[in-house]
Image (cartoon, helix red, strand yellow):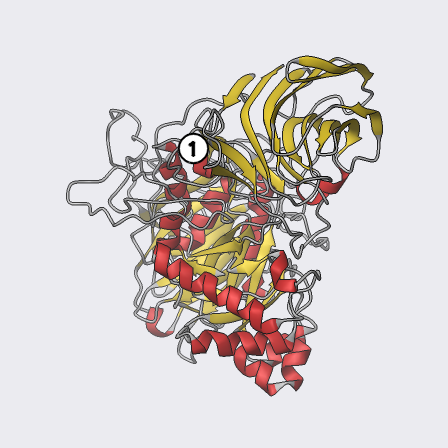
Amino acid sequence: MATRASPARRALSQNGSCSLQPGGAAHKGWQGFPPSFPLSRTAALGGVGRCRPAPGQAGGAVTCARCRAVRRHRGPGRPRERSWAGMGCAALLWGAILLACSCGPGPPRVGAAPLLAATYVLDDANGLGREFDGIGAVSGGGATSRLLVNYPEPYRSEILDYLFKPNFGASLHILKVEIGGDAQSTGLPWAFPGWIGKGENWPYDYPDITAYYIVSWILGAKQYHDLDIDYIGIWNERAFSSKYIKLLRYTLDKHGLEQVRIIASDRLWEPISFVMMIDSELHGVVDVIGAHYPGTKTVKNALLTGKKLWSSEDYSTFNNDVGAGCWARILNQNYVNGNMTATIAWNLVASYYEELPFGRCALMTAQEPWSGHYKVESPIWITAHTTQFTQPGWSYLQVDGHLEGGGSFVALTDGLGNLTIIIETMSHNHSKCIRPPLPNFSVVPQSATFYLRGSFSMVQTLQVWHSRLDFESGNSSLFQQLHPLRVWRGRFSLDLDVDEVYTLTTLKTGWKCGYPEPPPPQPFPSIYSDDFNIRNPPFSEAPNFADQTGVFEYFVNASDAGDHVFTLRQVVVQRPITWVSDADQTISVIGNFKWVNMTVTCDIYIEKPRDGGVFIAGRVDNGGIYVRDSKGVFFWVFADGTYRVTSDLAGKEILMKGLAGVRDNVWHTLTLNIQGNSASGLLNGYPLWENVTISKPGNGWAALGTRSFEFAQFDNFHIEAC
């Protein structure tokens, strides 16, 4: 599923708002997504948050610092920075305009080779290119936003503002979310609840049930959260069924959801494009062909369909400056090379334990709710180069888009006279995405002259925003506003260095704001407890527990009048239709992956008679798509009165076993103590086993879980670790 980012930003907050200027309006809040969605509720949105003070301003100032340094660019052998203070914003030089701080050719470079020079024409007289659909990001596919909901205010709202607030940070147009299927996994399903397949790992055997499930989710998003879903997907990176897609369209229309469009198939361009070419009915119900990680290229059949083409999942790269270079390159070149009019990053925010698969493969990082620390990474500001100066519904200009010296440019217009040009000159080694492999290419410093024709011929001034990724010093300059650029008789020139991004625009709405620095990073607390005693929790999942298989939720145990009325319960009792090879056991991890020595204590309640079972664990070393292979120290007890100690989640590597006397539907207390190369276990405070030798792993999370997909309860969880 994809939805527009303004309501979506509300969908990702719980109950906070950014600071409002006088007169700012607070919008009505809404309750959070269903328990399967990893985020929760919102309240206020609107107004202007506190901006980072300009140099010399008091900390409470609310005006953003504008770039006051006047800059000019260099060719080989020429200094990068020079002050032009006091000279004004433009000077006539050799019959061309030297544009304030950034854009003129500059004085002659003694002994330097001339820059490669080329000209480019921007003209709308012969019509426009494809309609722009937006830039967005995915929250989902393994609960990537899991820890975000646990952030205290004001930090949670600050994070969301950096992602969604217009003209503030990334200003995303699209939010794509996972439809939770009770498994390790937009509206796009990664997995489906097991009951849809009636015991089979396939969602298309009963397509009417699957279609109704998806439509119910869309209706629920509107009824309970006031969210209008714009697009719905089929099945993430798995096979599609033409019959199901047609039935989904019928079911959507039957329930008054004619405005919801279908994206297929969130995998590769083929075979969906070919099938649409030979199946006119399928062609008629698919609105967008969405491909994942297309490498900026499309295929002939996709173009021949005449449909919108999206990179419906892309990026997935570590969010350092190389990740920013990857993102800058594909944001432009997905259209230049592949005619894709929307690009969606996986993932939105790295709000999950970093050592899980694809740690920090997100636009920004927020993985410490216990400290409040988060980091606005460079991809946020690369995103802003496009999103703050365009909107869905604008159109691309018909241009080739390739720069002669390497790199690319795109130009977009709203059809009302506004023009935005985004230029990137990312080098090969500084713009590698995680996938697919990137063919070799070269980028060199160059001079680019642009001629504005058609309705743009009267443009006299362009606002200039600039980023430079500096991989030598590490001192990158991100999304800095330079002095306006004067256009002389429909012409302007730029000296472009390598690894730069420029936005040139008629819009004056760009803004780089920021909040005060968040608290410093802190490791997960070495002593941590949770008794789950919350009567009306604002969300269903206990803080900091990250479910890897199964779903662990707050539970009111009405049958217990004693100390276990409020517990944590595993609630998935039928194996889902999975996207990856999930574990056969359920597991939720918590804590610090670097922990070596730890004592984990938890009250447990087996609900399944005969073959039910639960565990607590330490030094768990894996999760996500690799959870099936998790190693660690697992202390199991079973309803048949036995226990086991294993070094793997699958329970095959047995270190010790015996009788425990545990029964189902009775509360027991388990304690696991791991010190160095030795482990021991207690049952109800008494030693049950001890001095088991542990060879590996040497560190990892704490965890709890069940033997199978079964009901079980946990209470009074406590860790002491180092």
Q: Is residue 376 above or below residue 676?
A: below
Q: Residue at x 26, y 42 (%)?
A: 48
Q: Judge left or right: residue 339 versus residue 84.
A: right
Q: Judge left or right: residue 441 versus residue 350.
A: right
Displayed quadrant of residue 414: bottom left
Q: Which residue is mark 1?
A: 151
Q: Judge left or right: residue 441 versus residue 2.
A: right
- Count of marks overlaid on the render: 1
Q: Nearer the viewer, residue 662 or 298?
A: 662
Q: Is residue 199 above or below residue 146?
A: below
Q: Would you say residue 134 is visible in this rendering?
A: no
Q: Residue at x 56, y 77 (%)?
A: 247
Location of residue 582 in the rendering, given as x and y in whole percent from the top left corner = 70, 47
Location of residue 352 in the rendering, given as x and y in whole percent from the top left corner = 56, 37
Q: Would you say residue 475 is visible in this rendering?
A: yes
Q: Nearer the viewer, residue 413 or 39?
A: 39
Which image quarter holds the C terminus? Answer: top right
Q: Secondary structure at mark 1?
A: loop
Q: Nearer the viewer, residue 568 or 702?
A: 568
Location of residue 696 in the rendering, given as x and y in whole percent from the top left corner = 80, 23
Category of crowding for the residue at label 1, using alpha-carbon neighbours closer than 10 angstroms: few (below 14), some (14–19), many (at least 20): many
Location of residue 653 in the rendering, given as x and y in whole percent from the top left corner = 84, 31
Q: Nearer the viewer, residue 157 or 330?
A: 157
Amino acid type, residue under disc 1 in the picture: Tyr
